[in-house]
Image: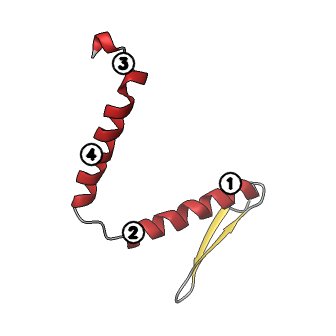
Amino acid sequence: MTQPIKLDTSDSQFIISIDKDFLDKEALLELIDYLRTESLAREVDFDEDIEALGREIKSKWWKKNKDRFIPKEEQ
């Protein structure tokens, strides 16, 4: 019985073989997209200010939209 996923290596590459019965094409494309995203995320060099910016954006959004979620009498 063959394994559904096989990993080989060369000098500069990982070579992955996946049995078609194990994973359909759509799932494989999603996996490849995920791997690309992870690779790009590792290349980005955010400084600590990005978290402060995120908190500021959330705060502004919440102030603008809280009436949609919490009745005024409960605020």
Neighbours of disc 1 within 10 Å: few (<14), some (14-19), many (20+): few
Distance Cα–Cα, label 2 vs label 1 = 23 Å
Q: Are marks 2 and 1 in contact (CB under 8 Å)?
A: no
From the image, state whether disc 1 or disc 3 is nearer to you.
Answer: 3
Q: Nearer the viewer, mark 3 or mark 2?
A: 3
Q: CA distance from mark 3 to mark 4?
A: 20 Å
Callout count: 4
- Picture coordinates of residue 42 (x, y %)? 39, 69
Identify the image quadrant of residue 26: bottom right
Give left or right: position of 35 versus 65: right
SS of the residue under disc 3: loop
Question: Which numbered disc flags the more N-terminal residue, 1 or 3?
Answer: 1
Callout 4 environment at 10 Å: few (<14), some (14 to 19), or many (20+)? Answer: few
Residue at point 36% right, 38% down?
Answer: 61
Q: Amino acid at mark 3?
A: Ile
Residue under label 3, please give it: 70
Report whether residue 55 is seen.
yes
